[in-house]
Image (cartoon, helix red, strand yellow):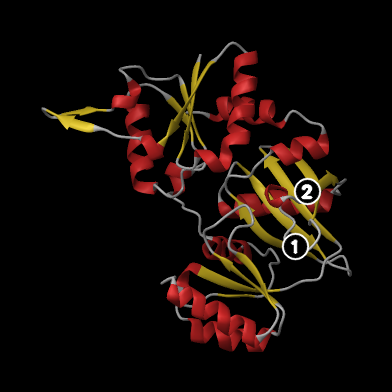
């Protein structure tokens, strides 16, 4: 069997992709990666010529981290399916989604799932007003980045004004961000949901950083999440429309549970370290079983 992972951000997912490659090779599968950063095609005499394919179509294509090239990826996957390949796209073609945390938060709220107080605006002036209303500190973060990138804790109006001035200088648009209530927490959890399976780890920030992401140097440990928490993670994933994903949950001092966000392309190397489970094998098996 030939398996190809399709991605537009190989560097960000290199650890996970290498783990998938290891598990694929254990099974005797041929494994390759289509990095859309190096992707090219031509149309010659009315025919589509994709140089990367070399005339060969893999049996299964697994989409991972290609959400910034939505239209191109959609057409490519449709083409591969017409050629007889099976594709696991985590409902990408069905919902035509891209990374948009604001849209995901709306979906979660409409599904009755508690999220932190959140504000979205198309200008920084309105963000300033809401910042005063919600109170400092608060979280200001990119609505499209992942792995803890573009996430800031704002402690004062002065700090926020300096931040906004920097964004304006860099010509970053206000609509690219969301502002959220800062919640002091007892536990910062990442739940990885793959079909009916749920794995949970506690994330602990490295010294001097409020972000607990494993990819930013935070530490992780196994966390025994109760059935209520597992159900919350699965409901959050369903609300966003995914078959697998990472759900970030905060539990505050009063045991109130908030879903911070749903990650469409979660890393799983940290989860393997925390749980001792072979997540790459589970991920690969699920992707193969759900490919169509």
- Residue 45 location (% of width, % of height): 10, 27
Residue indicated by mark 2: 230
> For this view, does 243 lie left or right of residue 277?
left
Find the residue positioned furthest to the left. Answer: 45
Q: Nearer the viewer, residue 127 or 160?
A: 160
Q: In which quarter of the image is residue 284?
A: top right
Helix, strand or loop for disc 1: loop
> For this view, does 34 lie left or right of residue 136?
left
Q: Which of 217 and 54 is in front in this view?
A: 217
Q: Image height check: is 134 above or below 176?
A: below
Find the residue positioned furthest to the top. Answer: 28
- Identified at 46% across, 48% down, the residue is 67
- Residue 163 location (% of width, % of height): 56, 77
Residue indicated by mark 1: 209
Q: Image height check: is 126 above or below 28?
A: below
Q: Which of 95 and 201 is in front in this view?
A: 201
- Identified at 40% across, 40% down, the residue is 37
Q: Image height check: is 285 above or below 215?
A: above
Circle 2 residues within 10 Å: few <14, some 14–19, many ≥20: many
Viewer-side label of 1, 2: 1
CA separation in Å, label 1 and label 2:
27 Å
- Residue 260 location (% of width, % of height): 68, 62
The tag earlier along the polypeptide, 1 or 2, is: 1
Q: Image height check: is 69 above or below 56?
A: below
> For this view, does 260 lie left or right of residue 239?
right
Q: Which of 73 and 217 is in front in this view?
A: 217
Point out which mark residue 98 bears.
none
- Residue 47 location (% of width, % of height): 17, 27
- Identified at 55% across, 61% down, the residue is 101
- Identified at 74% across, 41% down, the residue is 270
Circle 1 residues within 10 Å: few <14, some 14–19, many ≥20: few
Helix, strand or loop for disc 2: helix
């Amino acid at each position: 069997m030939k398996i190809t992972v399709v991605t537009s951000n190989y560097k960000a997912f290199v650890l996970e992709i290498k783990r998938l490659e290891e598990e694929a090779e254990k099974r005797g599968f041929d494994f390759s990666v289509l990095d859309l950063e190096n992707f090219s095609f031509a149309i010659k005499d009315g025919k589509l010529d994709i140089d990367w394919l070399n005339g060969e179509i893999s049996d299964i294509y697994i989409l991972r981290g290609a959400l910034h090239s939505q239209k191109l990826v959609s057409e490519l996957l449709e083409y591969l399916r017409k050629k007889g390949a099976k594709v696991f796209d985590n409902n990408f073609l069905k919902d035509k989604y891209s990374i948009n945390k604001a849209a995901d938060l709306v979906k979660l709220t409409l599904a009755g799932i508690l999220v932190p107080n959140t504000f979205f605006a198309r200008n920084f002036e309105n963000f300033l007003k809401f910042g005063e209303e919600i109170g400092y500190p608060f979280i200001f973060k990119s609505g499209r980045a992942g792995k803890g990138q573009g996430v800031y804790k704002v402690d004062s109006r002065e700090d926020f004004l300096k931040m906004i001035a920097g964004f304006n200088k860099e010509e970053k648009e206000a609509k690219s961000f969301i502002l959220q209530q800062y919640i002091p927490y007892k536990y910062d959890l990442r739940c990885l949901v793959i079909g009916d399976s749920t794995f949970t780890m506690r994330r602990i920030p490295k010294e001097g950083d409020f972000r607990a992401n494993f990819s930013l140097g935070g530490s992780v440990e196994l966390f025994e999440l109760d059935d209520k928490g597992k159900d919350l993670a699965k409901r959050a994933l369903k609300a966003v429309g995914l078959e697998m994903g990472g759900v970030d949950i905060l539990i505050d001092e009063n045991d109130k549970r908030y879903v911070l966000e749903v990650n469409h392309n979660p890393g799983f190397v940290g989860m393997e370290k925390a749980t001792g489970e072979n997540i790459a094998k589970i991920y690969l098996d699920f992707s193969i079983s759900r490919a169509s």
